[in-house]
Image (spheres, helix red, strand yellow):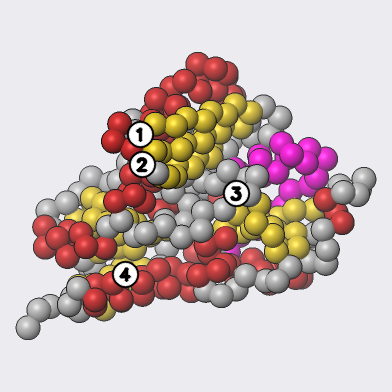
Amino acid sequence: MQTPIRIGTRESELAVWQAVQVQQLLEKEGISSVLVHIKSEGDIDLKTPLYEMNVQGIFTRSLDIALLNHTIDIAVHSMKDVPTRLPEGVRQAAVLRRGPVHDLLVYKHDLEFLHRDKPAKIATSSIRRQAQWLHKYPAHQLYNLRGNVNTRLRKLAEEDWDAAIFAQAGLERINLRPKNSIVLDWMLPAPAQGAILVACREEDDQSYAVCQPLNDADTALCTKIERDFLRTLLGGCSTPISALAEIEDGDVYFSGQLLSLDGRQSVSIEKILPEDIATHIGKDSAEELLERGGQAIADSIRAAEAKK
């Protein structure tokens, strides 16, 4: 009898939902599995803003350790939380077919605050979302909002904020998207937003092999392009970097953006390449962006981080 694959997951409702998707896909391939719940540092500290923490891998580190300690066989992550360079001994086993990529604005009453003279109060812990919002609405006030999606929705209801920003996939996957919400289609998402990554140990060929049928080639390519863009610019998820690659009719459409922390400075790029030669479009776009003013923004972000 085959030993069940041990699937590591964070304890949040969304993380468990993602792990269950992997479990069900494995079941369709005739592979039995069990869920193993692991608490992450990012779930324990809900007060410190992410940009004040050592955010690289904060939601993935505990699962990485469990993998390397042989406590679990595979780990399931929101791909946007995964550092662009995986820890030594860990490899990407599969990327599931992507879900919705955009952000949502969840508002408390109506959208009048987007048009009034009085500054609106918007909540999000994401540096990227803060910078993009301030770029479009420079007079608005931004507030830190941490916790799982249930906690953040509750905080929005309790505080005197006008609205909060969430990932569309996160709310819709666990059926928590409120009616009073809109898709922010003007806001470029985080690299790999909406994608789910499965990781295994480098030497574990068996777990790698059983995960291969779960891999969606288009999603894997697009998220690689986006993460190459992120890594080439700065490499951290605590920076205002956005990227989206999509495949249509054999072509890859790529958009990338880097903003200053206050949203005042912005450089963007768009490219289209045939899918078969688009592998390096993320790296190439980042290098071009740095030459067109991105380097000065990147340097200012590093300088600000060094002062902390």
Question: Residue shown at 51%/36% (left/top)?
Answer: 255
Look at discs 2 and 4 and give the one toward the viewer.
Answer: 2
The local secondary structure at tag 1 comes to: strand
How far separated are the C-alphas under marks 3 and 1?
Answer: 32 Å
> Label 4, on which residue?
22
The local secondary structure at tag 3 comes to: loop
Does residue 107 appear anywhere in the picture? yes
Question: Residue shown at 49%/64% (left/top)?
Answer: 43
Looking at numbered disc 3 in the image, what kind of residue is underneath it? Ser
Give the residues drawn in magenta, as a range.
Answer: 124-147
Density class for disc 2 (Cα within 10 Å; few <14, some 14-19, many ≥20) is: few
Does residue 131 belong to the magenta stretch? yes
Report whether 171 appears left or right of 11: right
How far separated are the C-alphas under marks 2 and 1?
Answer: 6 Å
> Label 2, on which residue?
250
> Label 3, on which residue?
126
